[in-house]
Amino acid sequence: MQEFICSSIKNFPSSAKVSWTSPSNIALVKYWGKKPIQLPANPSLSFTLNNCYTKTEIEFKKSSSFSIELYVDGQKNTSFLEKIETFFSRIKEFCPYLFNYQLTIHTENTFPHSSGIASSASGMSALSLCILSIEKYANNLSESQFYKKASFISRLGSGSACRSVYGPIGIWGNHNSFSGSNNEFAISYDAVHPIFKNYQDTILLVDKGKKQVSSTVGHKLMNNHPFSSLRYNQANHNLIKLKEILSDGDLDSFIQLVESEALTLHSMMMTSEPYFILMKPNTLSIIEKTWEFRKENNVPVCITLDAGANVHLLYPDQEKDNVLSFVKDKLVVYCENQQYICDRVGNGPTLIKEHYA
């Protein structure tokens, strides 16, 4: 972690305004369970999304006293401040220059937060990229140093956020099959068959409300879970399988592994102590209807789930018309207000603007 400590705080501007968009991601091999502080119990791999993202702007003003004002969707917000303040306390050692500023943060999502579409991943990565931009300006960080440290500090806010810094695929957690993989930060990965580079993800919004059990609580329940060690071994083996699948473009094997991972994630929730269920009846209906559609029409579409009730349909770009017709005809009835999001694999975050004075 020594490499991530800021080398100098001399050349920082008196004021700045920086904004980034950073995407959510959908894990194919899931991480569930972590060790202090924000280290994964098993490695994970995710598709970076394109349309589900957070846009964040930070205005920096030099001041003798540190303060934060947070605005969410244009409204002053205090409910998320505790999480932001915890994050800043964790990164103080690595970004001490922040505490010489008054910060005004404006953030907004293109999708519902706290509903299981990894809003903390996009939110914390966007925030981290804004923070690191001012350090890059002051200390001439290279591109690789910039993204590596952005991934590192993103993890201290939300584990999965470290993967959102990269596209089209992020890998987080040490694994012998992936050179450079690390528990402290994510790495990018693009050694994949062309069919996966524009893979589609249609997200069916079964429940847009806040989850009954947060991911933070769910992760902690893995500490004494009777099946945790078996799950961690399974995830490591599945990463080996997935690397070959992504290279070969084997869609049948992709479907089997991705769906198994999704259902295993939720089985860990249902067998923890205390146990809980984040899926809803409509989640199961969508899964069953999708399996029927795949079997009857020989369309390579599969489901996956994050820690929530919403269902992600993953499928090749050439199947887009078939799958969207199926969604409109058969699945929207199971979605809250018949809403769904059309997304795809993306290339990672985008710098919107930066100004220093």
Image: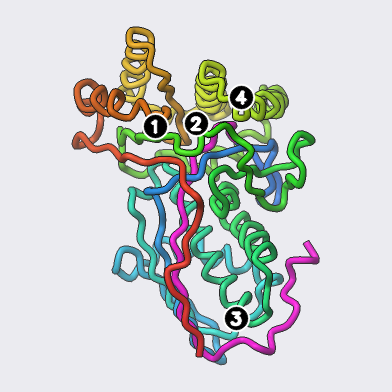
Residue at label 4?
A: 248
Residue at label 3?
A: 99
**Image mark for residue 317:** 1
What segment is highlighted magenta in the picture? 1-30
**Residues under numbered marks 1 and 2 in contact, where contact means CB atoms less than 8 Å apart:** yes
Q: CA distance from mark 2 to mark 3?
A: 46 Å
The earlier-in-sequence mark between 1 and 3 is: 3
The picture places residue 210, in percent across and down from the top left corner, at 36, 44
**Quick check: can you spot residue 32?**
no
Residue 2 in magenta stretch: yes
Say what secondary structure mark 3 lies in: helix
Please rate how many residues cluster around mark 1, counting C-alpha atoms within 10 Å: few if below 14, some from 14 to 19, many from 20.
some
Residue at label 2?
A: 195
The picture places residue 126, in percent across and down from the top left corner, at 49, 61
The earlier-in-sequence mark between 1 and 2 is: 2
The mark closer to the camera, 3 or 4, is: 4
